[in-house]
Image: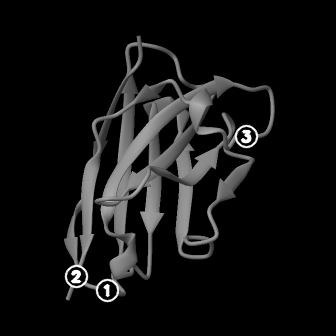
Amino acid sequence: QVKLVESGGGVVQPGTSLRLSCTASGCDTNWDVMGWFRQAPGKERELVAVISWSGASQFYSESVKGRFTISRDNAKNTMYLQMNSLKPEDTAAYFCADGPALRSGVTTEMREFTAWGQGTQVTVSS
C-alpha cells in the first residue's frame, strides 16, 4: 500500500513562491500518473495538476496554468509542485495523489486517484 507524504506548505505573501514535495513509499509509483489537488474551506476538492509516469505529459487547471509547474523525480520517489506568483485564492490544503499506471498520457478523473496524502496547508495572505 502506497504512503504519500506532502511537505513544503506555509504562509506566504501574494506574488511569492513555494515548492511542495510529495514523497511516496511502500509501493513503486514510478509507472503511475500522479497529481496535486487542493481543497479550500467550504469548497470541493479540485484538480491542480497531474503528471504522467515519465513526466512527459502534464495537465494543469486553468486557474494555475502558467504559474505552477508539476514535476517528478522517480529515482527519489518524489513529485513536486512549484508554485509561483501565488494569489490569495490559491489558499487551500494541497494533497498529492497516486493514480493509475498508464503507458502514456494522464487522467484528470479524480476517482482514478486511489491513494492520498494527508495534505499540506498553503496560505497566501498579506
**Image position of 11 (left or right of 46):** left
Which residue carries the number 1 mark? 14
Relative to 104, say whether 81 is above or below.
Answer: below
User: Residue 106 bears which disc, if any?
Assistant: 3
Q: Secondary structure at mark 2?
A: loop
Which residue carries the number 2 mark? 125
**Image position of 7 (left or right of 86):** left
Relative to 32, say whether 122 is above or below.
Answer: below
Tell me the amino acid under the disc marked 2.
Ser
User: What crowding class fits label 2: few (fewer than 14 Cα within 10 Å), some (14-19), or many (20 or more)?
Assistant: some
> Of marks 3 and 1, which one's residue comes earlier in the chain?
1
Residue 30 position, x and y percent, is: 58, 25
Q: Quadrant of residue 20?
A: bottom left
Tell me the amino acid under the disc marked 3.
Val
User: What crowding class fits label 1: few (fewer than 14 Cα within 10 Å), some (14-19), or many (20 or more)?
Assistant: some
User: What crowding class fits label 3: few (fewer than 14 Cα within 10 Å), some (14-19), or many (20 or more)?
Assistant: many
Residue 98 position, x and y percent, is: 51, 30
